[in-house]
Amino acid sequence: MLDRNIEVMQQHPLDGSRILVLPLVALGDLTIFLHLAWRLSASGAQLTISSDALFPARGYFPWLNVLPHLDVPISQLAAQYDLVIASYERFYLHGNWSHGCKGLKNVALVTAKKISRSSGLLERKLLVNDNSFEGATCAFCKNTKAGLSMVKWVDHYVEEVFKIDKFPIQPILSGVPEGPRGGNFVLIFPTTPEPRKNFWLLGFRMIARSLSRRGWRVEFACMSSEQARLRTALPGFPVKTSANLKELIEYVGAAEWVISNDSGGGHLASLMNKSTITITRRSDDFVWRPGFNVNNTVIHPYIKFKVLGRYIWRPFVPVWQALKVIGFPVSRGSAL
């Protein structure tokens, strides 16, 4: 009887509760909210996430209940779940956060960046089944100079606010078809929705040609609206698109290396435990680098400067570092 009482006492306050996560739409942000939901599941809670993008790939997340976009007021969702964790940008800055929402005690708003103190949101106390949690509405990142990735900042949030110090036993993704061990496939995501983040297409083409000469099979991935332009800019290499996230996950699953700008493709690959290379003008410890595993390399320019308010950085990126890190395919290298 004593042992049973101790076991009950050690149950987490969120054990058995129903938690709804409402993420941002962008792929990079979605991976961060996925990690958040995964970490919360270690409490014994039942996790649900609402995402049109994730819904086709729901079979790869057996621990998670995935729903399409819920086009209902957040007040209605708060009545259906014990805890709602929602994107600050989506539901406060760009959503319908009415005066009545201030009374929703079981709703936490989170963001990667910053919540204005003038909003009054930072003083909100979270109440979940009579359990109170301090600081649940906040920005994940507390200090951009601390050197932590956004993944680590989410870990910090879960551990500090909800006191969850365990990781789930089940992997975040499971059942994804993998490429052959020692394969020779490199996948490159050469664009993002923000052109200022993008490295030169010519630079990616140079990397692809050099890798091809070393024995790697190189392909490019992009949005369908970009395919025609990129096929012209990247002759000699397949340029492919995916109809949905399920197809993209399976495509990334076949790769041994993924190269990208600071983009959702790199975050997804890292989430899938792939080796990644990110080309960016920022430092090698910038917050939004892929951080779901230890095999993530950041390549940045040796120097950069501003001219008329714009950064000049692309000519100074040491692209040879990508070749040095990736090296030769296992099959090719063993024969040399």
Image (cartoon, rainbow, N blue to C red):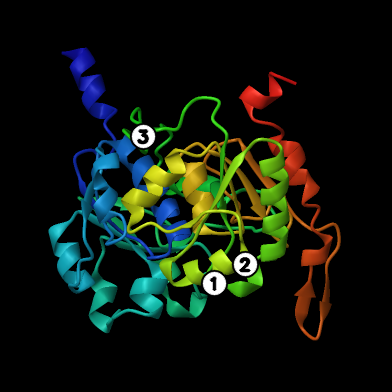
Residue lying farthest to the front in this orientation: 236
Tell me the residue that label 1 is attached to: 229
> Residue at image x 61%, y 52%?
289
Q: Amino acid at mark 1?
A: Arg
Which part of the image, by quadrant, shows the N terminus?
A: top left
**Is 181 in front, or is 268?**
181
**Disc 2: which residue:** 233
CB under 8 Å between callouts 2 and 1?
yes
Query: Disc 2 versus disc 3: distance between alpha carbons?
Result: 30 Å
The spot of residue 201 in percent (x, y) is 66, 64
How dense is the environment of label 1, judged by Cα within 10 Å: few (below 14), some, or many (20 and up)?
Answer: few
Residue closest to the far bottom = 308
Q: Amino acid at mark 3?
A: Pro
Q: Visible in this render: residue 162?
A: no
Residue 36 image point, x, y percent: 40, 48
Answer with left or right where residue 142 lies relative to residue 281: left
Left or right of 304 on screen, residue 34: left
Dot 2 crowding, Cα within 10 Å, few <14, some 14–19, many 20+: few
Q: Is residue 26 visible?
A: yes
Give the x, y percent position of residue 248: 39, 51
Q: Quadrant of residue 302?
A: bottom right
Tell me: residue 268, above or below residue 101. Answer: above
The label nearer to you, 3 versus 1, is 1
Residue 40 place in picture, x, y as percent: 34, 43
- Residue 258 falls in image quadrant: top right
Q: Is residue 7 left or right of residue 76?
A: right
Residue behind mark 3: 177
